[in-house]
């Protein structure tokens, strides 16, 4: 297998040079890279989860710093950290529960069972929670007999018990990595099939003879609309072109190719056409913890138009786009500026942007932001691969995917006062 650092450096270069387009591709490649990191990480007998977490966190900091605005990278890093913690907790709970079940032998009488009760659920949970910090779980288990929670064994079985403990350490180490990699394989599969899972819900939301408005180009939106068409829904689609990159032109062509009635409009015509629309369906770059949306530039205008005319504003987003951070968090970069060449021709406007004088500043400045922020109050519904959810429910979804300890993977240095 290639050296993992070579893979990390190659992926970092791709992120910096913006060679990876789309949150799905970025998420999938991030998960695949972290899977390689975990598979090649050597873990000690004690605190295996801590070693994996340190390795993933070290790589994750580099990936996030390479392109902070690509929030899907940080999402996947945090998801992987959560998976490691959950798998280790599951193994620890099973180990302690097994110890509790074996603490009383089958041939003991009732009086002996009373003297040596099975470990309670609280003891099991406490020991499991301690696995990620020193002393190790094995140390805790070995100390349990001193407190009287587990009966002493005879000295004749000491050698075999020591061998079994050593073998158990080795097997737990291998099983932890195996379980984490299996969970990562499931995560990669979920990312790959999220479009299909979202599209399956299209028939529940798009009805006969409706008019749907969208902006720009999104594969999730394309598959969602085509899925409704395949279910014999007859409807019309208005596509705002999504200047300055005009991705809406590509979406309109794809929709027509798939047999949907499509009307292409300019972005400035959204307010003029919104009164004819029954529903707005758009994609997202990221969904924040408060239910706000980071989306392609122009979508906030569409959301305001939809609210003004009481038109439902529906956002399609895979679970890999759910970000556990809030827009006000200092490590969140909400926007980036693209090249001015997307807006105008430098040859035609060179006189207005002359930097050659050395002293005079240009009179014409060009600002080309990539994203808009849509507040949660403008969103009617989120449709994810797990179903439809209100913006107020997003924080509950995020709690299932992330650990509180991993919300900040990269900490910025404090600013001088």
Image (tube, helix red, strand yellow):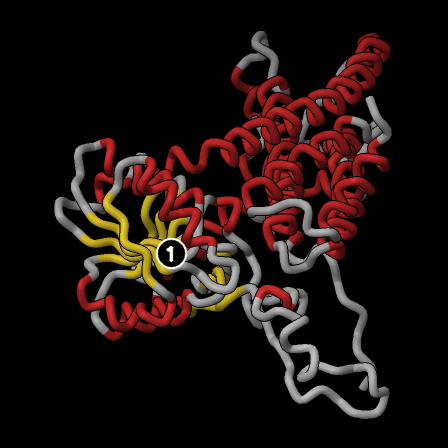
Q: Is residue 241 above or below residue 368?
A: above
Position in image of residue 389 (x %, y %) = 34, 51
- Relative to the observer, which residue lies in front, 43 or 93? 43
Position in image of residue 73 (x %, y %) = 64, 48
- On the rendered structure, is 351 left or right of 375? right
Q: Is residue 283 above or below residue 243?
A: above
Position in image of residue 158 (x %, y %) = 83, 13
Q: In the displayed image of the protein, which residue is found farthest to the front?
A: 348
- Relative to the observer, which residue lies in front, 282 or 186? 282
Q: Is residue 167 above or below residue 97?
A: above
- On the rendered structure, is 31 left or right of 209? right
- On the rendered structure, is 189 left or right of 333? left
- Relative to the observer, which residue lies in front, 78 or 67? 67
The residue depicted at 23 percent of the width and 64 percent of the height is 311
Position in image of residue 233 (x %, y %) = 17, 39
- For label 1, the residue is 393
């Amino acid at each position: 297998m290639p050296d993992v650092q070579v893979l990390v450096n190659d992926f970092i270069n791709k992120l910096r040079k913006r060679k990876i387009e789309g949150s799905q591709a970025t998420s999938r490649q991030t998960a695949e890279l972290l899977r390689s990191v975990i598979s090649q990480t050597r873990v000690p007998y004690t605190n295996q989860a801590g070693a994996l977490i340190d390795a993933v966190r070290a790589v994750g900091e580099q990936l996030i710093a390479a392109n902070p605005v690509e929030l899907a990278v940080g999402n996947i890093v945090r998801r992987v950290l959560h998976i490691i913690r959950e798998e280790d907790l599951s193994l620890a709970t099973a180990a302690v529960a097994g110890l509790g079940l074996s603490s009383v032998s089958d041939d003991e009488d009732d009086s002996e069972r009373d003297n040596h009760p099975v470990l309670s659920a609280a003891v099991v949970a406490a020991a499991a929670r301690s696995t990620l910090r020193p002393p190790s779980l094995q140390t805790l288990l070995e100390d349990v007999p001193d407190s009287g929670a587990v009966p002493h064994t005879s000295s004749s079985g000491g050698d075999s018990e020591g061998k079994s403990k050593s073998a158990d350490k080795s097997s737990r180490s291998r099983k932890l990595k195996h379980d984490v990699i299996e969970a990562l394989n499931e995560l990669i599969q979920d990312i790959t099939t999220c479009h299909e899972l979202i599209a399956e819900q299209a028939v529940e939301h798009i009805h006969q003879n409706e008019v749907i408005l969208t902006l720009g180009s999104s594969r999730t939106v394309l598959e969602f609309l085509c899925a409704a068409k395949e279910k014999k829904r007859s409807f019309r689609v208005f596509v705002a072109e999504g200047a300055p990159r005009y991705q809406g032109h590509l979406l309109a062509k794809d929709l027509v190719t798939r047999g949907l009635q499509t009307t292409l409009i300019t972005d400035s015509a959204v307010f003029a056409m919104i009164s004819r629309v029954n529903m707005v369906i758009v994609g997202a770059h990221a969904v924040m913890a408060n239910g706000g949306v980071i989306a392609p530039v122009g979508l906030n205008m569409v959301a305001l138009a939809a609210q003004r005319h009481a038109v439902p504003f529906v956002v399609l987003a895979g679970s890999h786009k759910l970000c556990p951070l809030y827009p006000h968090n200092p490590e969140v970069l909400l926007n980036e500026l693209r090249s001015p060449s997307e807006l105008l021709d430098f040859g035609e406007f060179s006189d207005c942007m002359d930097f050659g004088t050395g002293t005079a500043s240009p009179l014409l400045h060009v600002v080309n932001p990539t994203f808009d922020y849509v507040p949660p109050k403008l969103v009617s519904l989120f449709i994810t691969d797990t179903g439809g959810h209100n913006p107020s429910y997003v924080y509950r979804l995020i709690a299932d995917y992330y650990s509180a300890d991993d919300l900040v993977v990269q900490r910025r240095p404090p600013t001088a006062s």
